[in-house]
Image (cartoon, rainbow, N blue to C red):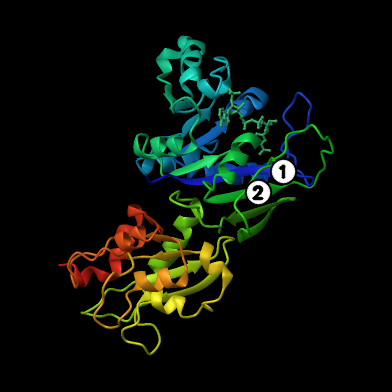
Amino acid sequence: MPHPYVLLSAAVSLDGFLDDTGPERLLLSGAADFDRVDEVRASSDAILVGAGTIRADNPRLLVNSAERRTARVAEGRPEYPLKVTVSGSGDLDPAAQFWHTGGEKAVYTTDKGAGRAAEALRGLDHLGIDIVSTGPELDWRAVLEHLHDVRGVRRLMVEGGGRVHTQLMREGLADELHLAVAPLFVGQPDAPRLFGPGAYPPGRMRLVETRAVGDVVLIRYVPTAPGTGELAGAADRQWLALACELAALCPPSQTAFSVGAVVVAADGTELARGHSREGDDPVVHAEEAALAKIDPADPRLASATVYSSLEPCARRASRPAPCARLILDAGVRRVVTAWREPDTFVAEADGSGLLAAAGVHVLELPEFEERAKAPNRHLLG
Ligand SMILES: NC(=O)c1ccc[n+]([C@@H]2O[C@H](COP(=O)([O-])OP(=O)(O)OC[C@H]3O[C@@H](n4cnc5c(N)ncnc54)[C@H](OP(=O)(O)O)[C@@H]3O)[C@@H](O)[C@H]2O)c1
């Protein structure tokens, strides 16, 4: 199911803390960085914080710049982003500024927490706060799907705290991390940390930007490690987007699709990429071109993911081995595609079915279908 683009945003001390143990909120950023955060808020459809942050900081989470709010309205968006919190307990303070400022609000909680939240917020019925249970436990995928499908959120900014950031990062649901590193130390072992212990996606994230903002340094990272099994992660979307971009590089053809493919190791290392009719080979397919660049004995293939803008072919006239066969022979056990092969050249091609029958996890992310089709419009009538 499609999710919003999830951007985690936090300010941290040099020793990795989000706050100190004092009763007041520790101001880590300076004026210039607060203004940068305001800009990111203005570009978001919703802002999420955990109930712990509401309790600790009593934040308002507004777009403070009047110009930015005016621009949002001119674009047909609400003046303020939707404010979202998550709470397992439902133990929410009705006097918190979160409820009394800005635009619409939503609470995601558990079956147990929903009743308590409704009770706690009863006096605020006039504010129309939406309380949504995801079942006996808080289910982050259900939260993101509901925000996308029901609330129309396409870009979600998550402003903490540590428990929320940790879960979204560990579950591979964060599309981007904005880290503002502030030049001070906290030094208190009991102060809240940005990320807690646990099993995170392996490997290194990709650095996309560093920027000095006053005396704070903004670092932006995006994840690279593919999801596992049938579960799609944020990095899966980044790699499939790249496969769709590669499809646009194909020499045009009236007799074959334009497809892009990337092979990525479990730790997020790109092993190879390819596209249809690459180089001097007029019939090579994208997955075939990419796999041909990898040593068949590479041990990383067994846990790698193949991203292909179109599902791997099950039959082909140009060569004896279809791409589904090449993927199985390479030992790859996970494939992510954007688009099922239409009957244009081969009737009832079902490369995904062939792969699944052989035990491969095949995921289709239909939100990329239009991008995958774009270089093939002339073939689709
Ligand atoms: N420097 C920064 O950029 C920044 C930004 C934000 C916050 N902070 C700091 O971070 C600290 C707060 O962080 P925190 O980790 O304590 O709180 P948090 O992440 O804001 O919220 C944690 C709360 O969210 C709910 N929750 C989260 N995941 C859940 C799950 N899987 N199931 C059920 N409930 C879940 C629970 O609410 P219930 O307790 O209601 O069940 C939990 O106690 C504060 O010190 C604040 O100043 C710093």
In x, y percent, where is residue 340?
Answer: 27, 61
Decide which of 125, 255 is in the foreground and name it: 255
Check mark 1 vs ligand 1: CB closer than 8 Å? yes or no: yes
Q: Amino acid at mark 1?
A: Val
The tag earlier along the polypeptide, 2 or 1, is 1
Residue on which disc 2 sits: 179
For the point 59% across and 45% down, which residue is it?
170
Q: Vertical placement of 89 versus 172: above or below?
A: above
Q: Which element type, helix, strand or loop, lies under badge 2?
A: strand
344 to the left or right of 209? left
Q: Which element type, helix, strand or loop, lies under badge 1?
A: strand
Q: Residues within 10 Å of mark 2 (few under 14, many from 20)?
A: some
Q: Amino acid at mark 2?
A: Leu
In x, y percent, where is residue 10?
Answer: 64, 42
Find the residue positioned furthest to the bottom: 280
Q: Is residue 93 visible?
A: yes
Residue on which disc 1 sits: 12
For the point 51% across and 21% down, which residue is it?
99
Find the residue positioned furthest to the front: 358
On residue 27, which mark appears? Answer: none
